[in-house]
Image (spheres, rainbow, N blue to C red):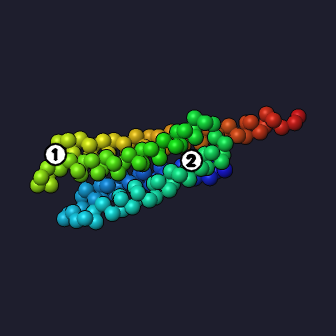
Amino acid sequence: MRKAFMISSGLLLTAYALQFVFAAMGGFTKPAGDDAYTLHSVNGMAVIPALSLLTVLFAALAKAPGRLVGLATLPLGLVVLQPVLAMLANGSADATGASTPLGLVIGGLHALNGIVAVHVVAAVMRGVGRLSSDAPAAVREEAPA
C-alpha cells in the first residue's frame, strides 16, 4: 500500500502542477471564451478531488502515521475551498460585470490556496518517502539473528 500511496501522491502533485499550466493557458487564450478554462476546471473539479481521495485512502491503508494521514487529508479541504473562492471572486464583479478590487483579492486567494495545496502535497510526498526509506531498516531490526 505504501507504493500506491507514493504513486497517488505523485500523481496528485503532477495534477496540481498541470493545474497551474491550465490556468495560464486560460489566462493567455485570446480571445478568451467561456471554454478558455475548461482544462483547469475539469482538472480542478474532477481529477484533483479524485486523486486527493485516493491519496487519503492509500495513506490509511498503508497505516501511515496519523500526522501523515492528516496531512494527506488537508488537500481535500483546500480543494473544497477553491471553487468557493472562485465563485466569490466572480460574484464580486460590479453591475457591468467588471472586476472589483475585492473580487481581485479573492481571486488572488484562489491562486494562493492552490500554492498552499502544492506545498502540502509536496510535504506528503516527503513523508511517504520517509516511510519508504524507514521500512527496510525496520525490517532489518526485526529480523531474527
Circles 1 and 2: CB distance less than 8 Å?
no
Residue 88: which disc? Answer: none
- Residue 114 percent location from the top left of the image: 37, 45
Residue 56: which disc? Answer: 2
Residue 10 visible: no
Q: Is residue 57 left or right of residue 144?
A: left
Q: Mark 1 or mark 2: name the one nearer the start of the chain.
A: 2
> Disc 1 marks which amino acid?
Thr
Alpha carbon distance from label 1 to label 2: 37 Å
> Disc 2 marks which amino acid?
Val
Query: Residue at left 25%, top 65%?
Result: 34
Query: Residue at left 57%, top 35%?
Result: 67
Query: Residue at left 33%, top 63%?
Result: 38
- Residue 21 percent location from the top left of the image: 35, 55
Q: Which residue is mark 1?
A: 100
The quadrant the C terminus occupies is top right
